[in-house]
Amino acid sequence: MADKKIKIACLLAKDFEDSEFRVPYDRLGKAGFDVDVISAHANEELVGKQGSERIETDKAIDQVKPDQYDALLIPGGYSPDKLRADERFVDFVRKFDALKRPIAAVCHGPQLLMAAGLVKGRTLTAWKTVQGDLKLVGAIVKDEPVVRDGNWITSRQPGDLEKFAEAFVQTLH
């Protein structure tokens, strides 16, 4: 019997930060992992906020369950702010974290972790303006390229993406 291929859920909405989706997505694919892009609707074209990236979604949030995936990727940009306004995504993140499987969030991605009520007492990083919000709800924030805390890997900004993607891939091996 062949080894089960690792499946990763990528939660995404329009106006994501182009590179924060593309760099980890490509790196995960190159490493041989399957990545499902999950949004409000399946087969929907999402455009990054810079306009350089376009991706067609694989699944709608109503078609998936957290236990179908081995890891979760939350790119930044305006996407996490849109996703956290939809309780289906917040609930998915909350249930996924309960499985103790890897979660990788970059830039504004931790906003979704915050909306799920998961950051109090956890150590993480995010975009500089999000760092203050995280501190206000009880997170321990470090201003470093990559921060690991248990099953979480977080990163700050596009300049950290190579280290972030590598840390995520290493966690999955």
Image: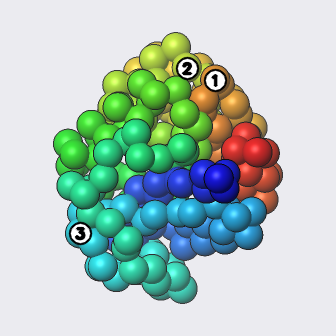
The residue where tag 2 is placed is 122
The quarter of the displayed image where residue 78 is located: bottom left
Q: CA distance from mark 3 to mark 2?
A: 31 Å
Type of amino acid under label 3: His
Quarter of the image for the C terminus: give it: top right
The residue at the point 41 percent across, 56 percent down is 11
Q: Identify the mark nearer the N-term, 1 or 2.
A: 2
The residue where tag 3 is placed is 41
Q: Identify the mark nearer the N-term, 3 or 1.
A: 3
The residue where tag 1 is placed is 150
Q: Is 132 on the left or on the right of 80, as rendered?
A: right
Marks 1 and 2 in Cβ contact (< 8 Å) = yes
The quarter of the displayed image where residue 142 is located: top right
| Vertical comparison of 98 with 173: above or below | above
Is 111 or 128 nearer to us in this picture?
111
Say what secondary structure mark 2 lies in. loop
The residue at the point 27 percent across, 37 percent down is 91
Type of amino acid under label 1: Gly
Q: CA distance from mark 3 to mark 1?
A: 31 Å
Is 22 or 7 nearer to us in this picture?
7
